[in-house]
Image (cartoon, helix red, strand yellow):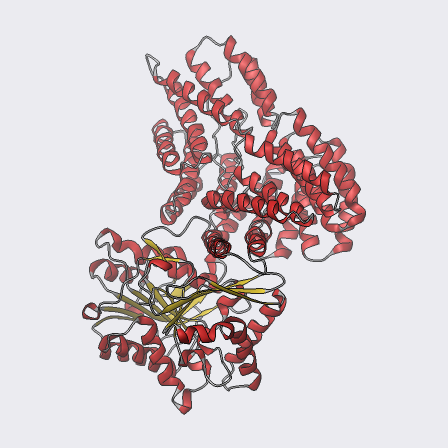
């Protein structure tokens, strides 16, 4: 039986399992073959004929289900809805149900679920797929059960139910392990590996795909399957940053199948893209010459159109002499898409050809093609494609000096991106996608247009809103799902009479700063400095601050950043009697120890309390109630899991116990399950973890260390938020001491913001670099003393603790006190 597999163009690719229903009609079978060859419009025509010829209601239901699948592929949502509803009605109205009709129902439910998810209804999709799973389980049909479980996991991920998604996928793995049918086992493991990659579990993805590979290597007849698994392994290795392994997998994937197959060509295109990305230009040029003639033998299908588009895009990156070849490839792709009535592929091909004309500055052609691509994307309701052409249109108009029209085009692209949020994670893997290349620039270029030399208050507000959305989109991309949910309050609405909010924005050619002073209009100033210099200065400052002695160079670098961010607004801050500075930091600035910025005489912390926030909106802030200061403290002093011992943690814990009522978990008693038990049983307002930990721009490498294992980001979220069932009050304060940002990772502070958000705590106190010495215990002790005995905000308690070290000759250097940052609610 031919397997029908649905491939969605969003972040989710539901599987439509092969069903045990024999095709009585040769027309039905013919349609299946066309669908399998991705000739969807032709399949629809044949199935419509089959539908007219069929008199048996269960056969009619099957055909209607197939039609819905094909309509979904072509973005014809109304027809897809109508046909799947008709299919379900027919089955549900049958007088008697047989095992066969139950399977038809499960199949139709699977299709309905993928349609619901594609239309942004993940809860409905999850419910539908659960029904399909129950039917398949009762019928003992393993393949259907596996497919619908994988689909469920993707709906759970889209809903932010990470732990449930992982449990569902673990169930799939368990089922596959006990599966005697080798072919089902290998394809099931590959599907599972691909889904694990899409939900950000890269190590698990690679492990599962390796299992699929081992099974396939034992069977010489499955070269096509082997190639597909190697291709998936290459994609996972590439996502992990293991480029050498990725290249090796792509080479093998290309070599095990015939040179005329689409899989061979896809593997070579991926190899080509990697060679270009790693600067191996000569090898890339040779491979591109080898690839060119192979396209002439391909029969038209969506995969071959995407292969042409990806190859043409790679050639464009190789340089100008390839432009003509690229244009021809795009033109053929457009023609093939038209012939197949594949509107989605047509939109991509037209849009990328428009992009090529943009590069050669043939503006009218570029604009015309982009408009055509956009109209198609909008007609098939494909916002994940439309935003790219809205953005492209903005660039083309801007290049021609039509600033007003360009700004409008960018605004539309920005609005489309905002509506996509949870789907942005892994948009269409067929057309290679990277958040840094395909999403981030839309926001930054739009802000560049808004912040002209004399922006209005409206433009300043919009620019701030855009950067806020970028921060959220970055975090969504980091978590592989939409993250910020819950009681969020705009900063402006907080009783912040003595707080100023500072938003620096890094643009390619300048650093912009927007400042919100209490009860005043927004201010704005800029420094003409390119992004590379900003990032270089930040990196050098960080290196200097982590040296055990004060360097003149460190103070100069610190003063330089002070001049960019604070100097232009110094007088207004004094005049407004501001006591707290709240920073919404952008990009590399998140790695800066803001407290150590230097004005030539004093550090910033000597004048102001300082807080950071990942965005303009926070969990409903309120002051910490001193009377309720109950602390759960967990720490490790001994070496565990390859990490060194932390002897000073015991002093830190004793100091905390002496200042506030505490429950302590130390060494063997600090396990992940013991931590959960304590959090569930007693409502602590403060959770303090004194242990090794790392913040990274990869969620899989962001963790805190317990005695039994490293607790990864998503698990930490579930640990800390499990008490929501018993008490709706969030943790007031999460303290992470001895943790640090990953070395050499410019975006590592994303992990810190990630933990702060995932923990569901109102505030998080953490360190940018690890401090295992007496100074850390002293600072933490003083922080709790201030919190417990004085009516001060968390930000002021941190400031006083930092000043107590700054005033001590032994601990004056910023290495001892500047690493600590407060994220979230500063009250």
The residue drawn where x is 39% and y is 52% is 484
Image location (x, y in percent) of residue 618: 36, 58
In this view, the residue in front, 334 or 226, is 334
Image location (x, y in percent) of residue 338: 66, 27
Examine the rendered structure and indicate whether residue 583 appears above or below residue 227: below
Q: Residue furthest bottom?
A: 809
The residue drawn where x is 74% and y is 46% is 361
Asked whether, in this view, residue 148 is left or right of residue 370, the answer is: left
Q: Count the marks.
A: 0
Q: Quadrant of residue 595?
A: bottom left
Image location (x, y in percent) of residue 221: 62, 35
Residue 46 showing in the rendered view: yes
Image location (x, y in percent) of residue 461: 46, 55
In this view, the residue in front, 187 or 436, is 436
Examine the rendered structure and indicate whether residue 681 appears above or below residue 403: below
Asked whether, in this view, residue 118 is left or right of residue 372, the answer is: left
Asked whether, in this view, residue 174 is left or right of residue 433, the answer is: left
Q: Quadrant of residue 787?
A: bottom left
Examine the rendered structure and indicate whether residue 435 appears above or below residue 539: above
In this view, the residue in front, 765 or 288, is 765
In this view, the residue in front, 771 or 225, is 771
The residue drawn where x is 69% and y is 33% is 333
Q: In which quadrant is the C terminus drawn?
A: bottom left
Residue 543 showing in the rendered view: no
Q: Residue furthest left?
A: 627
């Amino acid at each position: 039986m031919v397997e029908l597999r649905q491939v969605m163009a969003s972040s989710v690719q539901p599987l439509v399992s092969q069903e045990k229903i024999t095709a009585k009609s040769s027309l039905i079978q013919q349609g299946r073959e066309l669908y399998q060859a991705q000739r969807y419009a032709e399949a629809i025509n044949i199935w419509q004929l089959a539908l007219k010829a069929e008199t048996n209601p269960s056969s009619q239901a099957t055909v209607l289900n197939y039609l819905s699948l094909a309509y979904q592929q072509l973005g014809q949502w109304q027809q897809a809805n109508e046909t799947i509803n008709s299919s379900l009605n027919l089955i549900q109205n049958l007088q008697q149900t047989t095992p066969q009709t139950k399977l038809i129902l499960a199949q139709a439910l699977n299709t309905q679920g993928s349609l619901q998810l594609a239309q942004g209804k993940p809860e409905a999709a999850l419910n539908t797929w659960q029904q399909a799973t129950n039917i398949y389980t009762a019928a003992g049909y393993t393949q259907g059960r596996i497919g619908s479980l994988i689909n469920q996991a993707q709906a759970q991920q889209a809903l932010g139910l990470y732990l449930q998604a992982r449990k569902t996928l673990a169930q799939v793995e368990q089922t596959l392990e006990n599966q005697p049918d080798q072919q089902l086992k290998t394809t099931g493991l590959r599907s599972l590996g691909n889904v694990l990659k899409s939900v950000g579990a890269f190590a698990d993805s690679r492990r599962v795909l390796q299992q699929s590979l081992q099974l396939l290597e034992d069977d010489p007849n499955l070269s096509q399957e082997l190639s597909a698994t190697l291709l998936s392994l290459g994609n996972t290795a590439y996502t992990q940053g293991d480029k050498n392994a990725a290249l090796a997998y792509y080479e093998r994937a290309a070599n095990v199948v015939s040179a005329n197959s689409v899989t061979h060509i896809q593997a070579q295109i991926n190899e080509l893209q990697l060679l270009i990305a790693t600067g191996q230009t000569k090898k890339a040029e040779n491979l591109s010459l080898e690839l060119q003639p192979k396209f002439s033998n391909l029969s038209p299908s969506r995969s071959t159109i995407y292969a042409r588009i990806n190859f043409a895009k790679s050639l464009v990156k190789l340089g100008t002499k390839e432009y003509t070849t690229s244009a021809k490839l795009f033109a053929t792709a457009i023609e093939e898409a038209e012939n197949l009535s594949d509107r989605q592929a047509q939109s991509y091909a037209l849009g990328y050809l428009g992009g090529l004309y943009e590069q050669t500055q043939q503006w009218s052609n570029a604009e015309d093609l982009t408009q055509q691509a956009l109209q198609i994307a909008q007609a098939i309701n494909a916002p994940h494609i439309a935003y790219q052409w809205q953005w492209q249109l903005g660039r083309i108009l801007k290049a021609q000096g039509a600033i007003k029209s360009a700004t409008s085009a960018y605004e539309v692209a920005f609005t489309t991106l905002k509506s996509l949020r949870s789907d942005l994670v892994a948009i269409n893997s067929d057309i290679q996608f990277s958040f840094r290349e395909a999403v981030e620039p839309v926001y930054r270029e739009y802000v560049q247009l808004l912040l002209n030399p004399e922006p209005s208050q409206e433009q300043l507000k919009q620019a701030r809103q855009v950067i806020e959305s970028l921060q959220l989109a970055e975090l969504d991309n980091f978590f592989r799902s939409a993250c910020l949910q819950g009681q969020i309050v705009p900063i402006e609405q907080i009783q912040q009479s003595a707080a100023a909010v500072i938003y620096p924005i890094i643009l390619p050619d300048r650093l912009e700063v927007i400042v919100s002073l209490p009860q005043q209009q927004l201010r704005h100033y800029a420094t003409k400095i390119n992004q590379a210099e900003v990032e270089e200065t930040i990196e050098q400052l960080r290196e200097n601050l982590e040296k055990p002695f004060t360097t003149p160079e460190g103070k100069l670098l610190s003063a330089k950043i002070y001049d960019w961010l604070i100097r232009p607004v110094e007088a207004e801050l004094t005049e407004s009697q501001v006591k707290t500075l709240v920073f919404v930091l952008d990009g590399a600035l998140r790695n800066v120890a803001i407290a150590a910025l230097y004005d030539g005489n004093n550090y910033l912390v000597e004048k102001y309390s300082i807080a950071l926030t990942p965005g303009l909106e926070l969990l409903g802030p309120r002051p910490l109630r001193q009377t309720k200061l109950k602390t759960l403290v967990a720490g490790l002093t001994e070496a565990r899991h390859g990490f060194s011992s932390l002897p000073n943690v015991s002093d830190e814990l004793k100091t905390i116990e002496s200042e506030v009522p505490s429950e302590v978990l130390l060494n063997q008693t600090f396990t992940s399950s013991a931590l959960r038990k304590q959090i569930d049983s007693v409502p602590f307002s403060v959770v303090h973890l004194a242990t090794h930990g790392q913040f990274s721009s990869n969620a899989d490498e962001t963790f805190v260390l317990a005695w039994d294992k490293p607790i990864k980001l998503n698990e930490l979220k579930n640990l800390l938020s499990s008490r929501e069932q018993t008490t709706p009050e969030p943790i007031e304060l999460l303290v992470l001491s001895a943790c640090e940002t990953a070395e050499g990772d410019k975006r590592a502070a994303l992990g810190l913001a990630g933990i702060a958000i995932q923990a569901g705590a109102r505030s998080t106190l953490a360190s940018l670099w690890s401090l295992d010495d007496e100074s850390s215990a002293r600072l933490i002790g003083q922080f709790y003393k201030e919190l417990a005995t004085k009516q001060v905000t968390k930000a002021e308690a941190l400031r006083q603790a930092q000043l107590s070290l700054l005033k001590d000759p032994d601990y004056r250097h910023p290495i001892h006190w500047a690493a600590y940052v407060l994220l979230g609610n500063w009250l």
